[in-house]
Amino acid sequence: MTAAAPVKTEYEAVIGLETHCQLSTETKIFSTSSTVFGADPNTHIDPVVMGMPGVLPVLNQRVLEYAVKAGLALNCEIAPYSKFDRKQYFYPDLPKNYQISQFDLPIAEHGWLEIELEDKKTKAVTRKRIGITRLHMEEDAGKLVHGGSSLSGSTYSLVDFNRAGVPLIEIVSEPDLRSGQEAAEYAQELRRIVRYLGVSDGNMQEGSLRCDVNISVRPVGREQFGTKVEIKNMNSFSAIQKAIEYEIERQIAAVEAGEPIYQETRLWEEGNQRTISMRLKEGSSDYRYFPEPDLPPIEVSVAQREAWREALPELPAQKRIRYETKMGLSAYDARVLADDRTIAEYFDATVAADADPKLAANWITQDIAAYLNNEKLTIDQIGLKPEMLAEMVQLISKGTINNKVGKEMLPELLTQGGSPAAIVEAKGLSQISDPEQITAIIDEVLAANPDELAKYRAGKKKLQGFFVGQIMKQTNGRVDPKLTNQLLMPKLNAEP
């Protein structure tokens, strides 16, 4: 009797993200030094940043406003009473040797955001709610730059304190994510939200948005979590997804081989597409938190909280739902339009000027988007204003011009602006829609191409496109294509 094959264990990943988001304030969280990125090293510093004796931090009120707005946008409960804490952090990039953060009483807790996941094969979109454990305020550390060569023995490290004291919010998710795709989409949605709010530029290349991933694996059906590993050093959404996918495979292979998983911090090596061990993970006891003695507690009144809530814009998820349910757009178009607030506002203004939503969406997501990408521009830098795009869409909808004429006009409109109707009038670009005029043009084209007509009638039906092209050429693309085909086909198929 043949022994039954062993049942293969299926595993699932349990993933949570810790996201550090630099706030777009002009000055630092506890001092008046500038937060502008890219300045010469160690020029945006002051005695507070450097932790000099006798200086006292003062909370930047804009930081509190931005933190509360972010918490509200993430459906969090805003704490009426919170405080700052000292986090002992002995590292060269923090001159005070501690970081001012929030520990047990953060400004916001118990929130959520919804992500959308697209099936690449079916294009179907599903939604999943990801819990937010907490959002708290803290100061950023400086930046270490390592150089030299270990082979020659001439290694060195330099420190730039310009980033020290830049305000951060740290957003900690619940362990609700299960794949690299989900984690990458969560991070992207988070960036959309902070950009919509105007509280951060979310630029990962400049370090304005930094995500650390906590990941473990467990057999499917088991409630107990596996040993958690943290991954750092990911500067793009694709890197987040790839690092998670690699780490899932690494941990599963280790478990099945009977090897231990250590609670550690690992780095993502982009060049080698792998994670490597950096250090064993510290616990909260290692930081020895205690209440910050130089800052008073924070109290947010109900009136202030609600005033900030009223100031929130329509958020990306709300826009996507409105575009799909009220304007009839596809999930794809809704996602593209809502991804950037300036593009979404441009689209909304175009529709408000009586443009057909679907036609307006097509122009913005295709031709205009291609131009913006090629020219490295944002949509508020082009000459074509929303009202004028609406005017062009209306000309097409009414049959005054066709899409071909619209595409020919577009480069001039994008660079110089102006009225599409005025251009049509001045250049005589209005569409030819008179059946008698079109019939006469068709007859001229057929008479001028007897050989092609004979070949078509002999069975080369692809030559229909040739005749349409000749008609378009003769009319400079102004003829109504739909009506042209309706009038052309009977003549092509007529008995000679």
Image: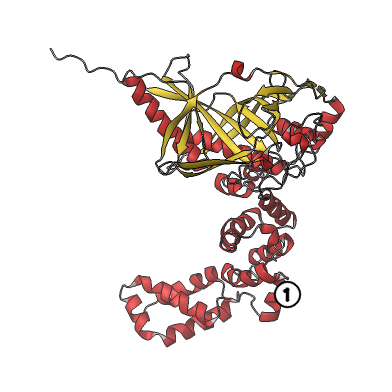
The residue under the point 67% across, 48% down is 37
Residue that extends furthest to the front in the rendered view of this protein: 153
The residue under the point 63% across, 31% down is 113
Q: Is residue 383 left or right of residue 185?
A: right
- 372 over 474 or under it: above or below: above
Give the residue pinned by disc 1: 422
Q: Using the image as rendered, state which of residue 135 and residue 279 is in the foreground.
A: 279
Q: Using the image as rendered, state which of residue 137 and residue 264 is in the foreground.
A: 264
Give the residue type that dot 1 points to.
Ala
The image quadrant of residue 56 is top right
Picture mark count:
1
From the top left corner, tell me how far across and down residue 213 is, in percent.
Answer: 52, 30
The image quadrant of residue 67 is top right
From the top left corner, tell me how far across and down residue 462 is, in percent.
Answer: 37, 70
From the top left corner, tell me how far across and down residue 115 is, in percent.
Answer: 58, 35
- 397 over 430 or under it: above or below: above
| Classed neighbour count for the residue bearing mark 1: other residues with Cα under 10 Å, few (<14), some (14–19), many (≥20) | few
Q: Is residue 310 left or right of residue 40?
A: right
From the top left corner, tell me how far across and down residue 265 is, in percent.
Answer: 49, 27
Residue that extends furthest to the bottom in the rendered view of this protein: 448
Q: Quadrant of the C terminus?
A: bottom left
Asked whether residue 125 is in view, the answer is no
Q: Quadrant of the N terminus?
A: top left
Q: Using the image as rendered, state which of residue 472 and residue 175 is in the foreground.
A: 175
- 163 over 282 or under it: above or below: below
Q: Is residue 130 left or right of residue 267?
A: right
